[in-house]
Image (spheres, helix red, strand yellow):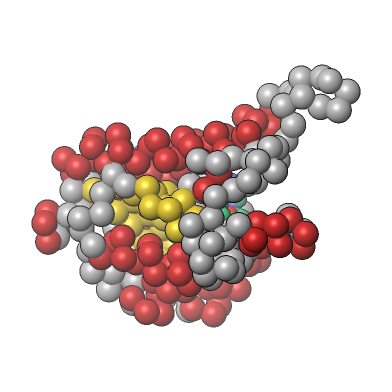
């Protein structure tokens, strides 16, 4: 899919990987972007930078299906269609399964993380795809592209990451059945599993933990640049043969147990 003039919803687009992808889609591909995020201040700063002719921001909680449905409808009202969805919204949700007093964890934190990271991914994919299916088919009869963001934790979740890792493994598991089911509409579905990227979420773990995570990146030995993630998103859109895949983007990093 040629992104010029196309409309992309980028959830979590006010920060980090989503923000860089929104900038890249607008500035280097001339796409229109609708950001779904909870951080209204950061989203409106981005809109002021990129201009409201290219970017709209909507306050949408991805875990709330009603808000997602309304957000997709509002995106269509604003720019006329939806061709791409990129879901970068997530929460890290660190938790213990058994606490220091040997009490089993309440499942609430686990469920809250799943609600944003996995059910949120489903909500956006389902409502965006229902809209994409109405597009006029383009080359190869293509109508839309869905990109879900997983994590290296889907494969090597660390101690304390049971909820996050389970949610991201769920995102990986979504790709193939969704690609199979939505192929009849000309919609492709892929996921990206980033390793360590230099974003507010990664920096929230603290300097020592960040150094330890950087140490396991094989080459190049540094955190990923959000621009490298944004370029992969654009490539997935532009290369019609990417479908049903999960692509690790991690400098061959494999997370240690803790
Ligand atoms: N940065 C990394 O090292 C790294 C590594 C692996 C995977 N990831 C994944 O990449 C994606 C982007 O991460 P990031 O590092 O840019 O994070 P980030 O924290 O910088 O950005 C996430 C954005 O999602 C938004 N958000 C959170 N909950 C939301 C909700 N319920 N509804 C709508 N928006 C919501 C936040 O407001 C924020 O703007 C996430 O899926 C994350 O799990 C990041």
The tally of labels here is 0
Asked if 231 appears above or below 120 in the picture, the reply is: below
Q: Is residue 40 visible?
A: no
Asked if 90 appears above or below 216 in the picture, the reply is: above
Instruction: Tell me the residue at 29%/54% (across/down).
Output: 145
Q: Position of residue 202 (x, y in %)?
A: 65, 58
Instruction: Tell me the residue at 48%/72% (across/down).
Output: 227
Which quadrant does the C terminus fall into?
top right
Asked if 32 appears above or below 48 in the picture, the reply is: above
**Res 46 → quadrant:** bottom right
Q: Quadrant of ligand 1?
A: bottom right
Q: Position of residue 218 (x, y in %)?
A: 53, 62
- Which one is in front, 172 or 64? 172
The single residue placed furthest to the right in the displayed view is 101
Instruction: Tell me the residue at 23%/62% (across/down).
Output: 239
From the viewer's perspective, is 144 left or right of 92?
Answer: left
The single residue placed furthest to the top in the displayed view is 103
Q: Is residue 4 visible?
A: yes
Q: Position of residue 20 (x, y in %)?
A: 50, 70
Q: Position of residue 257 (x, y in %)?
A: 65, 41
Instruction: Tell me the residue at 43%/74% (across/down).
Output: 24
Which quadrant does the N terminus fall into?
bottom left
From the viewer's perspective, is 198 left or right of 188?
Answer: right
From the viewer's perspective, is 15 left or right of 175?
Answer: right
**Res 4 → quadrant:** bottom left
**Res 77 → quadrant:** bottom left
């Amino acid at each position: 899919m040629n992104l010029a003039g196309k409309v992309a919803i980028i959830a979590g687009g006010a920060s980090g990987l989503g923000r860089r992808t929104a900038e890249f889609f607008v500035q280097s591909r001339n796409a229109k972007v609708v950001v779904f995020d909870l951080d209204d201040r950061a989203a409106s700063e981005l809109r002021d930078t990129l201009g409201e002719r290219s970017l709209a921001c909507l306050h949408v909680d991805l875990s709330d299906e009603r808000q997602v449905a309304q957000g997709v409808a509002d995106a269509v009202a604003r720019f006329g269609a939806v061709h791409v969805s990129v879901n970068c919204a997530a929460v890290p949700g660190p938790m213990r399964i058994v606490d220091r007093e040997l009490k089993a964890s309440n499942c609430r934190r686990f469920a809250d993380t799943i609600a944003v990271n996995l059910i949120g991914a489903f909500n956006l994919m389902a409502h965006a795809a229902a809209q994409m299916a109405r597009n006029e088919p383009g080359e190869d009869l293509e109508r839309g592209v869905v990109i879900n963001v997983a994590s290296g934790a889907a494969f090597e979740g660390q101690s304390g990451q049971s909820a996050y890792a389970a949610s991201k493994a769920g995102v990986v598991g979504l790709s193939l059945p969704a690609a199979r089911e939505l192929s009849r509409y000309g919609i492709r579905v892929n996921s990206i599993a980033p390793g360590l990227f230099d974003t507010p979420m990664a920096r929230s773990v603290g300097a020592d933990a960040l150094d330890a995570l950087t140490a396991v990146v094989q080459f190049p030995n540094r955190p990923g640049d959000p621009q490298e993630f944004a370029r992969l998103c654009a490539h997935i859109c532009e290369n019609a043969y990417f479908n049903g895949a999960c692509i690790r983007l991690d400098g061959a990093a494999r997370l240690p147990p803790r």
